[in-house]
Amino acid sequence: MPTISIQLEDLYRLLGRRLDKKDLVDLLTKLKCEVEEFSDTVLVYEANHDRPDLFSVEGLARAIKNLLGFPAGEPRVSECGVRAYAESVEGRPYVAFAVVKNVTLDDEALRQIIQLQEKLHATYGRSRRKASIGLYDLDRVKPPIYYKKADPDTTRYRPLGYDRDMSLREVLKHTDKGREYGFIIEGMPKFPVIADSEGRILSLAPILNSEDAKVTTSTRNILVDSTGLDPRIVVDMATIVAFNLYERGSATELCIVKTVYENGTVLVAPRLEGVIQEVSLKEVNELIGANITVEEAIGLLKQFGYKVLSVRDGRITAQAPPYRVDVLSWVDVAEDIAIAYGYDKLGEEASELPPATRGGRENPVEHFSYFLRSIMVSMGFSEVANYMMTNTNLDVSIFGRRVEPILVANPISERFTSIRTWLTPGLLGVIVENKNKASDFKVFEVGDVAYVKEGRVIEERRIGLAVSNYNATLTDGLAAVKTLLNTLGLSPRFTEGSVEGLLKERTALILIGDEVVGFVGEIHPEILYKLNYDRPVVVAEINIEKLLKTLEKH
């Protein structure tokens, strides 16, 4: 979760009032923010990845005003006359622009702007690969604005923070940002730039802006750009930044910019209308366990900046604020209703609980999992705990697996785009990450996996183990599996088999009776080479539920 640092005086100035420390913490909790530090002058909090509008003090102040019942009302909007044009830029095809006028900036406001940019880059922009943000002093720019390709060796400009001109290629080599993010564009025959009508380079996207158009405390009118791989996301980012900048001043104004592409497509930013969702209050109450009335729901939605467009037969049509990019379904609306209502109140409407039909007891699979853990520890293995979320490259592609993973529709991080289909990648990852700390590894994990088979989602509880040292072989894996199963009173058999990512001639399937319950084998050296690991790794995975059923039969 991104960590945001703000000055309390700056927050109070934007709010127009001071707040008691306890009240402020309660409000932050309602916004799903966790307080990390709270002194007399500084507040540090963690904001959820799905609320990028809270990545700076301006967005936080706006959200708090909504919760307190003091919304700012409709923003002032105009057509500012700034035109923008975009060429076809292979590898980074989309750009959106927005303008905010009459801002009032000081040093802390500039720090917040920079913080907002960097947090957006790191999260929503996937370290600038998916999208990036740039800001410029509009009064030092001559519109129209152009997004185009430029020769990396002959095109020159003065990058931000430097006192001399450089070619675009030199910027990648000789600046900190160029060395950090240059990989995004260095393979392109021509580099993407933003320029004004006089040909001045405003930015080498997504690397570094120009010193000649930088935003300072004297800036009053700001041009915002976002370039990236997805048209929706570049508009999202331009919208978030524009609306947060709008909070900086008493006479600020949002100005619409239309970017015209070569193929006739037009992208408009900032977005002025948020997502519209229809929710059934009956379904909301069933989901959150409450008995909220229509009138109460309308008031609760307003605390999160929603506009209620219509109410009919217990169904509410509501529009989220334009900067709320996390509202993707009616469930998100229901969550906001629940938070505004108060999680501490949920369930109070239930006068009594239904009578229990039997006493509580531990789930057999959980109990058995604990027992297996104790056996593995007694065998000298160390337990690890990996996330169930992963990404398809680490889980599937690198091993050449033929399995259908369950994908996340709207991932907040490239690390977590799917649910793991097996335990082996996580175990291998632990070993590779710690290769310089030890030469001998014996690790195990008990956890759930899920995948799609013939149109159905298959969920399994598994135990996985991994052994690695300079002399590790299949025999080590076979011995560990046999010891584990013998301790349970089971006599495993091993037969030849194949598992993607493992050496075929050094892989065996594990059988109890005639049923295959798992596998054991050596990781293919090609995979270890890709991961820069120089020792053999033996892995095994066993289906715990199949083991439990076998034991119950005996």
Image: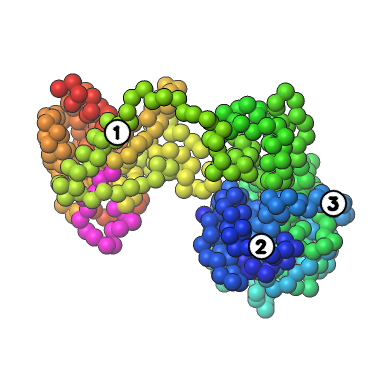
Q: Secondary structure at mark 3?
A: strand
> Which x, y percent locates residue 144?
83, 57
> Which x, y percent locates residue 308?
75, 37
Q: Check the picture and name the quadrant holding the C terminus.
A: top left
Question: Crowding at label 3, few (<14), some or many (≥20) Cα neighbours within 10 Å?
Answer: some
Q: Secondary structure at mark 2?
A: loop
Nearer mark to the viewer, of 1 and 3: 1
Question: Crowding at label 2, few (<14), some or many (≥20) Cα neighbours within 10 Å?
Answer: few
Read off the residue under disc 2. 19
Tell me the residue at 40%/31% (across/down).
451
Instruction: Tell me which segment is drawn in magenta.
Output: 431-445
Nearer mark to the viewer, of 2 and 1: 2
Residue 464 in the figure: left or right of residue 267: left
Read off the residue under disc 1. 362
Spatial distance from mark 2 to mark 1, Cα to Cα? 46 Å
Read off the residue under disc 3. 77
Residue 287 in the figure: left or right of residue 135: left
Q: Is residue 228 above or below residue 286?
A: below
Spatial distance from mark 2 to mark 3, Cα to Cα? 31 Å
Labelled pair 2, 1 in contact (Cβ < 8 Å):
no
Q: Residue furthest bottom?
A: 163
Given the image, on which type of amino acid does mark 3 rest? Val
Spatial distance from mark 1 to mark 3, Cα to Cα? 60 Å
